[in-house]
Image (cartoon, coloured by chain):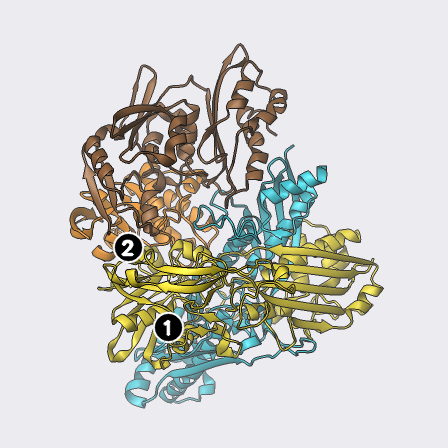
Amino acid sequence: MEIRKKYFADERNDDLKEIGQSRQRSDALGHVKGITPFYADRAIPGLLHIRMVRSPHHHARILGIDASRAERHPGVRRVITARDVPHNVYTVLSLINIGPEDEPVLAFDKVRWQGEPIVCIVADSERAAYEAAQLVQIAYEELPAVFDVEEALKPGAPLVNEYHGQNYYRYDSGESRKVILGDVEKGFAEADFILEQRYQASPIEQAPTETTGCVVVPDQNNRFTCYTGTQAVFFTLDNSSVILQVPGQQLHFVGGTAGGGFGGKVDCTTEPIAILASMLTGRPVSYIYNRYEEMQISSPRAAERIYLKDGVMKDGRIVARQVRCYVDSGAYSRHTPYGTQKAAAHFPGPYTIPNVRIDCYCVYTNRTPSSAMRGFGVTIGDFALEVQMDKLARLIGMDPLEFRFVNAYRDGDMKAHHQPTEGAALIECMQEAAEWADWPVDPRCMAMSSREPRRQP
Amino acid sequence: MGLSYRRFEKVSAATSFLTEEAGACVVGGGTLLVRRVNEGDAAVTTYVRVCDPEMKRIDEADGRIRLGALVTMAQLLGHPGLQWLAPAARIVGGPAIRSAATVGGNLFAASPYGDFGVALLALGAVVTVHGAVGVEEWPLAEFFARRDSLPAGLIVTSVAFTRPEAGTFRFVKASRVKPKGAAIVSIAAVIARDAGRVGAARIAFGAMAGTPIRASSFERALIGEQLITATLDRLEPHVTEGTTPPSDAIASAWYRQAVLPVHLRRLLLPEIDG
Amino acid sequence: MAKIPLHFILNGEERAEFVDSGATLLRLLRDKTGDLTAKSGCLQGTCGTCTVLVDGAPRLSCITLAEDCDGADVETVAGLAAHGQLHPLQHAVMEHFAAQCGFCTPGMLMAAKALFLTNPRPSREDVVEALSGNICRCTGYEPIIQAVLSAAQVMSASGPGAA
Amino acid sequence: MTRKRGRGVAAVNYPTGMNLGGDPTQALVHSTPTGNFMVTVSSVDLGQGMKQILRQICAETLGVPSERVVVDTADSDTGPHCMGTFASRGTHRAGNAVIAAAREARGVMLEVAAEMLEVSTDDLETDGAGNIHVVGAPAKAVSVTDTALAAHFQKGRSISGRGMFLVPRSYPSPVDGAMKPATCYAHACTVAEVEVDVETGEVDVISLKNVYEIGRALNPRMVEQQLVGGAWMGISHAIYETTEPYYPQRDHRGVDFNEYLMPGPGNLPRTEVVVLERPAPDGPYGGKGPGEMCANAPIPAIANAIFDAVGVRIDTMPFTPEKILRALRGLEA
């Protein structure tokens, strides 16, 4: 890696002693000795283990649950169902006043995705828990399911989540988070060319090598210590406190060292139930996702479908961009209403476009609830935007990199979400890339600067 | 229920135990069975470890090679007389899998796994099985046909095949992830030439059905032909005949059938591939 | 479950432990010996984070049965640093910034050590093959490959028997 | 020729932090009696190196070597509140909180040193090596250790500081979406070169040239870790990964590392990284969050390179061999 200091040299001071130095990581020695303490790396005598009975159906009514055989199974300490959870229906973002509460810790009336947890087995060994889980009998009435974001929004589609009442998250701006700048229809009317395209991505798993989980130990003074791989200690502690209806001071979270996260460990799916199991049994309890659960039960990056419509001039200027983005939240909200809003803030990308209309929909379907992942709300949008940029350039017969220079945002340019651009550096990145990759562009591009105001046409 | 481990020195004793104990299963390298148990399959209640040293041996006599069922992929790779088989042994997982995974266990791997079985099928291997009724030898194809409904107590103890003529065994596995990944398709071929033309051919495909299968139609069509591009182009319709590939997380059935002829051509005519 | 007594060598020390019949080597190591260096990343044999050496061969301890290791010589990362000195592989991983979250690192180190036991002067291709059963989600593998190659150089420069 | 080469470019930006929920983080810094410093936070290190970065930020602010700083992360009994490690906020938010805490601690430290040296605090500077001295007179100095000992045992002062960094919540306008979603943006441009096998649809990424603008590379080797690993994840997203290969059908989902596809050590391109620095005015020493953004630009760059190579557009991620082969056959038809 090289740092090219010729750019923005006057904005940087080089008289720092620690900053800018490639010091060895303080955790490197622990890593190579194998002694970095991950949440499961504590020898705890008498540890109990959790396995979950999960829905085999994508969408079904629960008619009855019979866990009596599981309760009698050797090694089983406790069987937990929805009625044991003090505040069973929750949503993680209620902490920042984003509601409604829409997800049960343990399903009771309905299951809304294949893999949804229903019955929690707490046993002396993983083996005993697995055996008992197979003895739980649940009667279902299957319901029609919907898996496609646009199908889900059609009238008559199966209703996924009754807590919302419709298959989308209702923002204060309506069925979508809207961002509007200028008049997009006027822009299209002026444009020399119009291009409308559809992009899509399917869900992606964060796939950290360490699976999601926690180990809970009952502490003195009726407190519970939760060793966890969470990415958000207090977020998880506070949500656990809400779900368990216990004051936060009764909970002690220890974490800070995760075996990879990539956004996959911001939900709060293992800690509350493990703490509850510890409360109910008085024993230390571990709840560690197996690899199947990490791959298919933990929230993935949401699937998205994106429609981009652009109006572009022969000289390369994009004069209008319309975005319709459907984010597949799965059966519950988790962090997706927030990620969808983040997507709305990110479009139309790092380009200055006078007329923009963005509608981002957070849509409920009968799939694994989605949540954060590295690049949350942005990664798939960037894929769509930057492929679209390539197509637009070719449509008007311009070099794809030059086309980006023409439209790249600069300091002071108004963004679609009505903020002036500050600290732009896209032009300089492209200049460096052009030079380095030997990608010839017009000299006027190489003379541009993010700090020079755009000349209005 | 619970779980236990039983060790048997004699195959016959293990067979009797397996017949009596419904949840008992023979464990080889553990790559299939221990994983199943780890993932919660409570139907398995006893690991049966057979310690017969014969099952760990590699023997060759009169051009006939016998591999004990517990011979590992690592053992095969280290065997000086079997270096020609290395391409098929090396693609079975990373080194840690290969020091556990066995010849016998590979025969039980469901599609798209079990690539070594593809090689054995092309080699015309026979499987020796010990069961309640005694010792039998089954052609490998028959074993695969019966694999999902084997009688209780049956133990695969070895496989045997005739050493192919030098240079006639070919193997390829196409996978997405490199250097190791599950098969899009794997192909093994033993092709003997007779005066510039194909004299005999045994070709097997992996991941093109529920078990490894022989490319029977294509093999028949190939006899007497010159091994050149034009032949393969002409015979291409035979290549996928009889294949019923799975659609799975690696590839769809459509894709497997679409690229099978490409990988087959590249295996048979490596010098031609651009 | 029946408790089975096992004798084995762990990083050069004799050990005797009781295990539940049918337990894996990973459980034996983590639950009984206090050696927590082998990680439990999948329990499927697909990630390599639990890689240890058994009688000098790399094994996935999550799918290796403890009872098959009675009398075996087991090595983990805990035994890699001899007499308080880091192994060249450990040095190299640090120097090359080849660990991020660190969860795959013990398995990677043992996979690399297994390579050196049979091939002290590996090519890049050999290293790639040796690490092919170990998943890393952070680094993109290249720094790990470079670290292993450089450790091999250091070790071959310091003479045979260094492994 | 069955293999065709092409190259493509993509350029992106990425927000640091998200103000759409209110974005606070706190930190505490205190000195031990011998002048070592503890940073206490509840922020999480996922492998990106938070512990080390906060250590360097704290050391820089205090004016001591980073070896004298220990970062204690994520014990809810001792670490003050942090929203968590996500949205590229860790380094930026926790870093700023640590700066604030370290500044306060440094203030006390200099006051004690000033009393010991009988000068004004304005006349003092730190040498970054463990000493405090009079500006322009390095000999007139007291060590950080002696200062801490004196503070603790003689002066009755606590060399400590509290740090808070809050970006107030921005509520988007329901009418036009006007909002301030982030405080600063990182940038990237990637040029990808690929080779496509036209008979199988398989793509090999040959090289990635990545230019990243990340504010300030606070620890360049650690930045490189993120950027190289992130570029790999970009390739992985582009041509391998999904939990649902037949989306929106839910069949045949991968449950292990054999079925959940990612590039192996034998699938690596030549990945090169160049970093530009335009310091963020509100960033800790100008730093932004580079860790998330780095996976994004490679994906469309690869898509565009595939088009350049073989003339097909794959508008659905991931760009599997099957999608490419079907598109190629569509071209022929």
Q: In which quadrant is the C terminus of chain C drawn?
A: top left
Which of the two discs, 1 and 2, sits closer to the camera? Answer: 1
Q: Few, some or many C-alpha atoms within 10 Å of disc 1 (few <14, some 14-19, many ≥20)?
A: few
Q: Few, some or many C-alpha atoms within 10 Å of disc 2 (few <14, some 14-19, many ≥20)?
A: many
Is A76 left or right of B148, judged from the image as shown? left
Chain drawn in yellow: A
Chain drawn in brown: B
Element under label 2?
helix
- Identify the chain of the residue marked 1, using the numbered disc in the image: A
Q: Is residue A140 visible?
A: yes
Q: Quadrant of residue A252?
A: bottom left
Q: Position of residue D237 (x, y in %)?
A: 55, 53
Q: Position of residue D77 (x, y in %)?
A: 34, 78
* Residue in the foreground of this view, choosing between A187 and D245: D245
Task: Give the residue at x 32% y 50%.
Answer: B38
Identity, as a three-letter code, of the amino acid under mark 2: Arg
Q: Which residue is mark 1?
A: A83
Identity, as a three-letter code, of the amino acid under mark 1: Arg
Q: Which mark is residue A150?
A: none
Q: Position of residue B194 (x, y in %)?
A: 51, 11
Name the tint of chain C in the rendering: orange
Chain drawn in cyan: D
- Identify the chain of the residue marked 2, using the numbered disc in the image: A
Q: Is residue D67 visible?
A: no
Task: Give the residue at x 49% y 56%.
Answer: A205
Q: Position of residue D23 (x, y in %)?
A: 52, 77
Q: Which residue is mark 2?
A: A127
Task: Give the residue at x 33% y 33%.
Answer: B104
Q: Is residue A414 above or below residue B127?
A: below
Q: Is residue A181 above or below residue D272?
A: below
Element under label 1?
helix
